[in-house]
Image: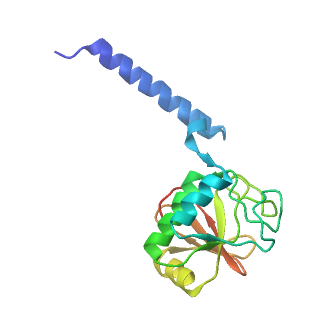
């Protein structure tokens, strides 16, 4: 026979945890376990092992240099997302913008680890425009494409600005 007090306690705990999670999200405070931040070295190791390069106009990786390309404090989901994109698209990938200063601010920003920039190569552009849904135009005029995962690919003047909410594409 089922122990009803044990079922009730488990159900009550589940309700409390769910309510706490939704309250945190509603107030704009994601739970601390929701995002895993990486060091520049950790992200660089994962990306280079997947054949993803890095380029910066300043030849540097300093987060506080606007001509650098830094991975410091990038989200694990972002790293996994660009690795997945490389794998499914078959395109060569070089990251030209990461978590360094000089990008627009906001919750889902470069600085907060959600975005990377990649060049406008024909392979990357053709894959995005033929596999993802047109999603309108951003306020700055960038044309948007949305992947089934919810990740957003914005075509800026000289690169793709990619926002990774999840590790899928």
Q: Residue at x 58, y 45 (%)?
A: 36
Above or below residue 75? Residue 116 is below
151 or 120: which is nearer to us? 120
**Which residue occupies 65% across, 61% down?**
115
Residue placed furthest toward the bottom: 122
Residue 5 locus on image (x, y percent): 31, 12
Q: Residue furthest left?
A: 1
Q: Is residue 17 left or right of residue 40?
A: left
Q: Left or right: 81 with respect to 96?
A: left
Picture coordinates of residue 106, whole percent (x, y): 74, 54
Q: Which quarter of the picture shows residue 117?
A: bottom right
Give the quadrant of residue 54: bottom right
Q: Residue 140: percent from the left, percent from the top?
A: 75, 72
In which quadrant will I find the N terminus? Answer: top left
Q: Is residue 68 left or right of residue 46?
A: right
Give percent across and percent down for residue 153.
Answer: 59, 70
Residue at 67% x, 55% y: name it: 40
Q: Residue at x 60, y 84 (%)?
A: 121
């Amino acid at each position: 026979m089922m122990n009803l007090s044990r079922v009730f306690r488990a159900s009550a705990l589940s309700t409390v945890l769910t309510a706490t999670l939704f309250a945190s999200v509603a107030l704009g405070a994601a739970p601390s376990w929701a995002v895993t931040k990486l060091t520049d070295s950790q992200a660089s190791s994962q990306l280079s092992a997947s054949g993803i390069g890095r380029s910066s106009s300043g030849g540097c990786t300093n987060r506080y240099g606007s001509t650098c390309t830094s991975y410091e404090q990038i989200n694990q989901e972002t790293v996994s997302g660009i690795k997945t994109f490389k794998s499914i698209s078959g395109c060569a990938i070089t990251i030209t913008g990461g978590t360094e200063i000089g990008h627009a601010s906001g919750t889902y920003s470069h600085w907060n680890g959600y975005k990377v920039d990649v060049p406008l190569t024909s392979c990357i552009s053709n894959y995005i425009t033929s596999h993802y849904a047109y999603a309108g135009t951003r306020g700055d005029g960038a044309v948007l494409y949305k992947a089934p995962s919810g990740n957003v690919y914005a075509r800026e003047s000289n690169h793709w600005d990619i926002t990774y909410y999840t590790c899928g594409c």
